[in-house]
Image: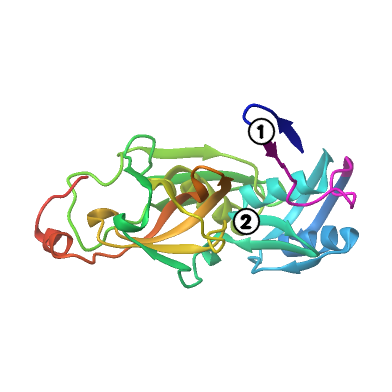
Amino acid sequence: MEYAARPSTITLRALSSGISKNYRTLKPKAYENTTLAQIVAQVAGHLKLKVVGTIKPIPIKRVTQYQERDVEFLSRLAREYHHSFKIVGEQLVFTHKDELGQSNPVAVLDEQDVISLRLRDRIKDTAKAVEIKGFDANGKQVIKQRKNASKRRQSIQQSAEASGDTLRIVTRGETQEQIDARTDAALAEQNDDQQAGNITLWGNPKLVAGNTILLRNLGVFSGKYLIKSTRHSLNRFSGYQTEIEVRMLEFIPDDLITLGMEATYANP
């Protein structure tokens, strides 16, 4: 808690995983001949938490927790294998990122419903494809995978949808499943925020990270969005406001102008 005067403000900061358990104790540990799900279950059991979420069946021959806190170790695994991780109460949520955004939107918004809105569609630093190579030391063979970026706005033509760059990565990885997961993670890291932005609106407690919203009547920016982060603020002058950071999950044309773009070139 922080107090400041003139004007008088109280700022509360919190850790999502709390401080009552030893989530942040530095630990060295090696895991061998196991799977991603088994590692998550083992860490959750040690922390006395219940695992929630859909974890892909990814075999892992060896991974080491290098004097890392449990939350740091699981966060690293989540990034490497295209999963999402957080601790909520007595639950350890670890789920494949493809499962995010499957829920129904908690709000439907257009320009009239917001205080301010800023959306962007970038081409710079995106990738048209990702190529990853790893080496299986036991089998003495190279394992590789290539994945092309999918077009988000399938129903309209654009003069340019992404850069022409191919991201090439050489990494460790003993199984094809590991390389496949790392390919998904690398492409998502490069392209997921291609259509994204920030919205400020009157306070809504339903707008929390992980939920989805629907934006309407916004042309090429209409569609379903995932809430990445949320900031709720209460001010004596402006009242209760919510600021959200979002990224597009699905483009949904919903106005005559956008629907008429199928035969034209539309780059916002």
Asked whether, in this view, residue 14 is left or right of residue 150, the answer is: right
Asked whether, in this view, residue 175 is left or right of residue 155, the answer is: right
Instruction: Answer whether residue 233 is magenta in the image.
Output: no
Residue marked by disc 2: 84
Q: Quadrant of residue 2?
A: top right
> How far apart are the alpha carbons under marks 2 and 1?
38 Å
- Residue 90, image x, y percentages: 81, 64
Residue type at mark 2 is Ser
Q: Residues within 10 Å of mark 1 (few under 14, many from 20)?
A: few
Magenta extent: 8-28
Residue type at mark 1 is Ser
Q: Residue at x 72, y 42 (%)?
A: 12
Q: Residue at x 70, y 38 (%)?
A: 10
Q: Residue at x 46, y 45 (%)?
A: 131
Can the viewer see residue 152? no
Residue 164 higher or lower than 78, as above or below? above
Residue marked by disc 1: 8
Please tell me whether the stretch drawn in magenta is mainly helix, strand or loop: loop
Most foreground residue, 219 or 138: 219
